[in-house]
Each structure stands twice: as C-alpha cells, then as structure tokens.
Amino acid sequence: MINALAVFLGGGIGAMSRYAVTKLSVKILGKAIFGTLISNILGCFLIGCILGYTLQKAEAVPAELKLFLTVGFLGGLTTFSTFSNESFCLLKDGKLLYGALYMTGSLTIGVFSTFIGYTITKHFIQV
C-alpha cells in the first residue's frame, strides 16, 4: 500500500511540475514544445542521477523513495526518462542489438501510434 501511495504522490507532483515547466516555457520562450524538451532532458538527467546513486548506495535509498522519485515523480514529469534509462541499461549491459531495437521500435511505434490515434480521431470528428 505504501508503494502505491508513493507512486501516486510522486506522479501528481511530477505532473504538476511538467505543467509548471510548460507554462513557464510558454511565458519565457513562447512555445510549449520547449517545456516538453526541458522536462524530458531534466527527467533523463535526474533518472541518470538516481541510477548512478542507487548503483553505488542501493541500501541508502528506501524502495518507497525510489518508487516515489522514478515511477512517480519522473513518470509524471516525463516518460522519456524511463525510456532513456532502459535504453542506457541495455547498452551498458552490452545488449547492443536489443538496445538498438528497443530504441528504434519505441520511437517508431510511438510516432506511428500518434499517427493512428490522430487519424482515427480526425475521421470520427469529420463524420
């Protein structure tokens, strides 16, 4: 139960953080896309920091805190950080083919899924 609560709270804080970054980027830079870029880059950096720290001091980070930060906060801030972490781990472990397939497949399927969702929605709105 505590794990679910940690993810729930972290996710809410992460999502609100992404919203704030996007609003601020629109105000300062004029476009929401910069908020997404900043959130994704920040999320990748933070998950790298968390991974680097927990690999060195796994016992120092309670499981609930790791769930709060990674699945919750960074999951709410961005899902790209998780994708980046998983890709990095595959490459780090020498699974170059799997890493390349995962990265290429994720990007291709993600963009294709966006296209399919857009096309289906556009069709139903016009009908």
Image (spheres, rainbow, N blue to C red):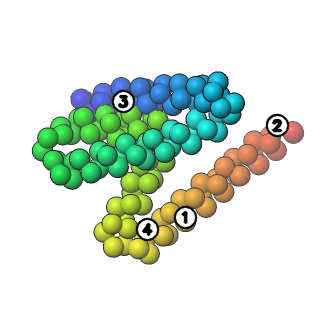
Amino acid at dot 1: Gly
Q: Residue at x 57, y 39 (%)?
A: 36
Q: Are marks 2 and 4 in contact (CB under 8 Å)?
A: no
Give me the disc on residue 10.
3
How far apart are the two marked residues, 4 and 3, measured between alpha carbons?
Answer: 28 Å
Q: CA distance from mark 1 to mark 3?
A: 28 Å
Three-letter residue code for mark 3: Gly
**Would you name the residue on which mark 1 appears?**
105
Question: Pointer 2: what residue?
Answer: 125
Q: Is residue 42 left or right of residue 61?
A: right
Report the Cα–Cα distance between label 2 and label 1: 29 Å
Q: CA distance from mark 3 to mark 2?
A: 35 Å
The residue mark sitting in front, 4 or 1, is 4
Q: CA distance from mark 2 to mark 4?
A: 38 Å
- From the image, state whether disc 2 or disc 4 is nearer to you: 4
Return the residue at label 4. 99
Compared across the picture, whether 118 is left or right of 44 comes to right
Q: Quadrant of residue 91?
A: bottom left
